[in-house]
Amino acid sequence: MNSESDKSLFNELRTNLDRHYQPTIMLFLEANEESLAKYICFNYNQELVCRFLINKVSLSISPVDVNNNLNQKEDFIEKSKERLNQHLLTKFYPSSVFITMPEEIVSDNLYMLMDSSHKSKMEYLYSNSIIPFGEVLLSKLNGIVTILSTIYVSDSEKVFEVVRKRLMSCYMEKHYHNSIKLEYIQPIIQISNDNITLADIPKPNASWERINRFALSFNGYQEFGSFDAVVKIDDIVNDKYKETGDFSLCSITELRTSLFLIQRGCTHRGDQPEGEHLSFVQELIEEIRTKVNGNDNCS
């Protein structure tokens, strides 16, 4: 994305976030008797969904008079029953109940767009291509990411965790992008040296996407605590390679750290290894395969 498209997308998502109306179910108490309570349920368009009969003796909740012409009626009924069950257990029946419906994530991409930049903090809007999810603040002083505003979506905690981890990388590298695009649908799983298998390691003809995901399965920043420390490990790998012409003297941790740093550099430049650089990466991965195959999981 170029700067003009960044600005256009940001303005559109910013407007959507400010104006977004979160779908809400509305329940109103119609009757509250000794053994029975009754609620009428409407969707956010004020259309009748159904009525709920709450049997206080058998501790059951039954939908009746269901409007079968409504889309999402099953979701409305399920969410309403979950809330009403709480009131049934606590024996408290309020006159009205409002339930926020989660929005489904309909894209596997997450976009993070810089909202504002200050000396000690950054603010980012995060969204998919349709729904704005919210805004976060990243402290440049300690790397802590906090939510400023949010819209309730399905898997909202997982979405925020993806955003938080990406911004932590920005903090560690002291490089803050105007826009960031993330793949969300397949979150990166961390694989320790003890648990790594041959199936985890990309094959010689693997795509850069496959190599990319493998590289991120080892977080060098988390392992060594800082960008500078990761660079030092990478320097050690390069020195050993220059000395011997291969990676045989490197440990698995050193090799995975070097691959991790290569991936981070490619991400920031928006490119991927080619020619001699790609051959270097492939040779590095093959040495990891050799060591795993020989159970040489030394640190």
Image (cartoon, rainbow, N blue to C red):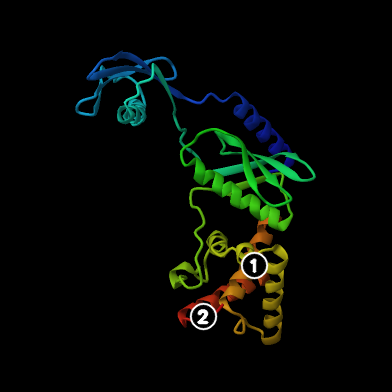
Q: Residue 47: which quarter of the image? A: top left
Q: Which of 174 and 70 is in front in this view?
A: 174
Q: Residue furthest right?
A: 119
Residue 52 located left or right of residue 272 = left
Residue at horizontal 68%, vertical 51%? 143
Q: Which of 84 and 48 is in front in this view?
A: 84
Residue 218 located left or right of residue 274 = left
Residue 95 in the image: above or below residue 57: above
Q: Position of residue 72 (x, y in %)?
A: 36, 27
Label 2: how many residues lie within 10 Å, few (<14), some (14-19) or many (20+)?
some
- Residue 270 in view: no
Q: Mark 2 points at which residue?
A: 291
Q: Where is residue 32 in the image (x, y as percent from the top left)?
A: 29, 15
* Disc ID at residue 152: none
Whether pointer 1 and pointer 2 mark residues with C-beta atoms closer than 8 Å, the reply is no
Residue 68 in the image: above or below residue 153: above
Q: Residue 248: which quarter of the image? A: bottom right
* Disc ID at residue 224: 1
